Amino acid sequence: MHSPHHPDQKAPIPVETLLLAYRSGIFPMADNREDDEIFWVEPRERAIIPLEGLHVSKSLRKVLRSDRYHVTMDRDFEGVMHACAAPRPGHPESWISGRIVDSYTGLHRAGYAHSIECWDTQDDAPPRLVGGLYGVSFNRVFCGESMFSRADNASKVALCWLVACLNRAGYKVLDCQFMTDHLASMGAVEMPQKAYLKLVDGAQGMPQATLAQAFESFVNPASAGVDYSSPASSSEGTEGASSGGSPGKRIAQSLTQTS
């Protein structure tokens, strides 16, 4: 799925420029989805989700354990971006322009941007993309850019998978940029930009595993070489902790142990 190119559309933002911006605590936006111009944003207050403090309700844990959605990583990055840019109730306009899509697609191809997708695979119909998120990864920092949901809890499921993978891979910071009621309900907190930059500075260095490796350890722990045979340390018991459990149960188990 590709964004339309116009003869006079400006070139994508170079990968190096984007990475320098993120390391400096700033990021680009557009006034609307049709605007080629971008402006750089440095929030006074920054929202982050503490990786050990994600709020997962009992009902959301039930959704996770049920594997209602088939979850993938980096399977349809552009599809997620276009879905995030699409009009939605209460938000007819978007800051994600065609140039923004092209720029972050370049960042994705360079290995610095990732997506998590939730697919509806029920019935006999082809899998349908019903939720997801995307963001930028550097050092041990992940900057969540946007998320969308076309089915109950789909974006929350994607966020749970992201946090579980970030924890397993050894990341330190999950940046959410701007606070929203939705993010606050999931455990996000606000801090001054200066405090955020201190967190970013303390998260230099490489994570202990890639996000793809962390994701695979939940989907197929046997091939990832991860031992799930130890007794579970939560009220969920050993269900989902063994290698025979489902991916969603392993995600729920992981989040129970960290939250």
Image (cartoon, grey):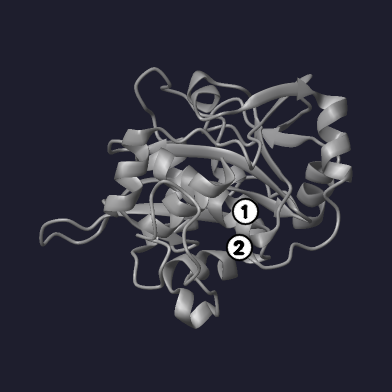
64 horizontally vs 178: left or right: left
Q: Where's residue 223, x and y in %?
A: 48, 82
Near-viewer residue (231 or 158): 231
Give the secondary structure at mark 1: helix
Of the 4 image quadrants, the one containing the N terminus is bottom left
| Residue appearing at x 63%, y 34% in the figure | 49
Q: Which residue bears the numbered disc 2?
A: 211
Q: Measured from the top left, where is residue 141 in percent x and y?
A: 73, 49
- Please give left or right for residue 154 compared with residue 98 in the image: left
* Horizontal side of residue 152 vs 17, given as left or right: left
- Does the residue at mark 2 contact the one at mark 1 (Cβ under 8 Å)? yes
Q: Amino acid at mark 2?
A: Leu
- Decide which of tag 2 and tag 1 comes sooner along the chain: 1
Of 6 and 52, which appears nearest the observer? Answer: 52
Most extreme residue toward the left is 124
Number of the label disc, if any, that sits on residue 217: none
Number of marks in the rendered image: 2
Percent position of residue 180, x then y? 55, 21
Please name the residue shown 28% across and 36% down the image.
152
| Kind of residue indicated by mark 1 | Leu
Measured from the top left, where is residue 189 in percent x and y?
Answer: 66, 24
When asked about the image quadrant of residue 99, the answer is: top right
For the point 54% across and 74% down, the residue is 226
Q: Residue at x 26, y 51 (%)?
A: 68
Label 2 sits on a secondary structure element that is helix
Q: Quadrant of residue 202?
A: top right
| Res 133 seen here | no
How packed is label 2: few (under 14 Cα within 10 Å), some, or many (20 or more)?
A: many
Q: CA distance from mark 2 to mark 1?
A: 7 Å
Q: Is residue 125 above or below residue 100?
A: below
Say few, some or many: other residues with alpha carbon within 10 Å of mark 1 (under 14 / 14 to 19 / 20 or more).
many
Which residue is denoted by mark 1 in the rendering? Answer: 166
